[in-house]
Image (cartoon, rainbow, N blue to C red):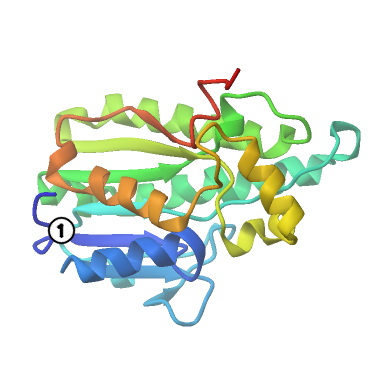
Amino acid sequence: MKVLTTKNILIIGASSGIGAEVADRLTQAGANTITASRNANANVLWDATDPAADLNPILPEELHGLVYCPGSINLKPFARISDEDFLNDFQLNVMGAIRAIRQAIPALKRSGNASVVLYSTVAAKAGMNFHASVATSKRALEGLALSLAAEFAGSNIRFNVIAPSLTDTPLAAQLLSSPEKQEASAKRHPLGRIGRTDDMAGATLFLLSDDSSWMTGQILAVDGGLSTIKSL
């Protein structure tokens, strides 16, 4: 993987799970890693659902990468999903990303070669029961990424999306709360296991690096084959 040591990378939602793994891997790779989250351990407290949240105090003159990690797993039967549920998921997954990107665009442009990585879900492509709210917001996030990839290609800002399947993170703890649940989840994936944070971090670092410099507007499925193949 081409060098990351000269890059300034902002990670939003780096306090746990995939975001924390990405931050650790970037730091190990020598990148200048800047973090923002609702956790006090971050460089700045930043609430993705707050329209007034301000990234400008921590943005460097040039920003080479932006990773937006906040997400939700709000699984309910459609009849029990309220308007508020849909709006809450949309605020976190889509509007938070929009606000972060809007604030970061000037610094991303000044770098001359930048990469933005967003996270969707396998459920945005593969219909899954009880996923109506999260799949709706994540599909909207994918549409946002494709539109921005087209709009900012001339500014050499790349936009790509990683679409994971179930990954062993604190966010998914309820779904993996017993050995039986873990085994059942693993069996649903053709590769026979659930995702790990290092799976997602590896893909993220690739998209941030110059090794992916000719990739933009892509939805990268990191899902153990769940979205595309079926074991017979």
Q: Outermost residue toward the right?
A: 79
| Residue nearest the viewer, comparing 67 with 182 | 182
Vertical position of residue 155 compared to residue 49: above or below:
above
Q: Position of residue 115 (x, y in %)?
A: 24, 44
Q: How many numbered marks, from 0 up?
A: 1
| Extreme-top residue of the structure | 232
Residue that numbered label 1 is attached to: 62
Please name the residue shown 63% across and 59% down the image: 171
Please tell me which residue lies in front, 231 or 117: 231
Name above or below for residue 79 compared with residue 36: above
Q: Give the x, y percent position of residue 145.
A: 39, 33
Q: Residue 22's image quarter? A: bottom left
Q: Residue at x 12, y 44 (%)?
A: 210
Q: Is residue 63 left or right of residue 144?
A: left
Q: Looking at the figure, which quarter contains the C terminus?
A: top right
Residue type marked 1: Glu
The percent coordinates of residue 6 (x first, y second) are: 8, 62
**Of 222 and 150, which appears nearest the observer?**
222
Label 1: which secondary element: loop
x then y, percent, for residue 117: 35, 45
Q: Residue at x 49, y 82 (%)?
A: 40
x 39%, y 56%: residue:
198
| Side of 210 where 199 appears, left or right | right
Q: Residues within 10 Å of mark 1 (few under 14, many from 20)?
A: many
Left of 113 or right of it: where is 187? right
